Image (cartoon, helix red, strand yellow):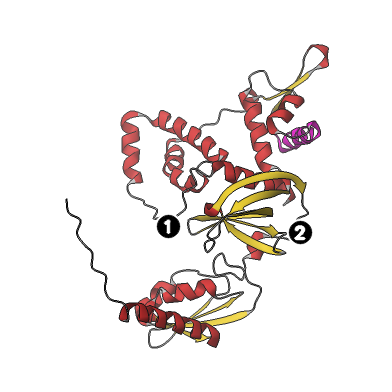
Amino acid sequence: MAEQLALVRQWLLLRTLSARRYGCTVKELAEEAAVSEKTVRRDLITFQQAGFPLQETVCPRGLKRWKLDITAEPALTFTFDEAVALYLGRRLMEPLAGTLFWEAAQRAFRKVRAMLGGERLKYVDRFAAMFHQTSPGAGDYSNHGEIIDQLVLGIEDRRAVFLTYQSLRATESVTYDAYPYGLIYHRGSLYLVGWSPDHGEIRHWKVDRIENAEVTEFPFQRPDDFDLAAHLEKSFGIYHGDGEIDVAIRFSPPVARYVKESRWHASQKLTPRPDGSLLAEFRLGNTEEIKHWILSFGRNAEVLEPPTLREEVIGELHALLSTYLHQPVPHRQEEKP
């Protein structure tokens, strides 16, 4: 994870170095990124080691200015099909809407559109109509750009973030410190993963429910062996658990093929049965999310193991049946014009 440190800050510095025609001093860069001059000098060394064409100019009185010498690099060109592919893939970046990465991507797409132009652009848009990405319930982060930037900055600089958050069950928002470890994009929504000092445990915060985020000056020590993928290895989605729960589900023939076509979890074992049904087995840390997944199949999914999960599903079904049987059907009244 050391290679990812200060990613957002370095992105901003690279953008500044490429935009300033006459370059910048270390002091100007430090003020731009709100960090120390020592940090900027370390970043400049990182850029040089990475092969960026940094140019150092010594001005009168020994003042040094830095800039990216784009003339030293070959012109970045795309073939027609490469430009079209990038343009058609622009919707895949929508989860970054409102962030500085999104702004840079939009500038690039505008250049591609200008290159295509006129009738060619109309023709290319016909290809876009051939593909559609559904996003029911997906988060809209167009107004969360500043919050996401603060979270990423806290992740990269390993500084605590002061969060104002309203959980799904809470009636009012609360404010506390969080030590941000990383972001996860799951089923159309962004989640922050990090340590909560107030709760003494790793927690997940849905970014949609973060009302404000502010990076503080307080550093935190992130575990060197922490890895987002490993953290969620036992999760059937975003809920985290440390258990070792063996889950077995029987899917009836009408949905067996659908289940078999996808990879739902790293631990899955799918065994077709002679009667056309499918036995699906998983090893998970908790069963909260898989319970809702099972219920989505209705009568075509039956929990075999563990007994506790089977009882939970039965309870949900009883509650659902009670809702429909013991409550009168509400009549919609037509509004008068």
Label total for image? 2
Which amino acid is tagged 1?
Gly
Q: Is residue 253 above or below residue 81?
A: below
**Residue 223: which numbered mark, if any?**
2
Most distant residue in the top direction:
60
Q: Position of residue 302 (x, y in %)?
A: 44, 84
Front-most of 160 and 335? 335
Q: Is residue 317 visible?
A: yes
Say the numbered circle drawn on residue 19: none
Residue 137 has which mark? 1
Mark closer to the observer (1, 2)? 1
Question: Residue placed at 83% from the left, 16% from the top?
Answer: 62
Judged left or right of residue 6, residue 98 is: left
Question: In front here: 232 or 132?
Answer: 232
Q: Position of residue 229 (x, y in %)?
A: 63, 62
Secondary structure predominantly adopted by residues drawn in magenta:
helix
Give, as a single range, the part of the protein colored magenta: 37-52
Closer to us: 331 or 274? 331
Instruction: Pinpoint residue 190: horizontal percent, then vertical percent.
Output: 54, 54
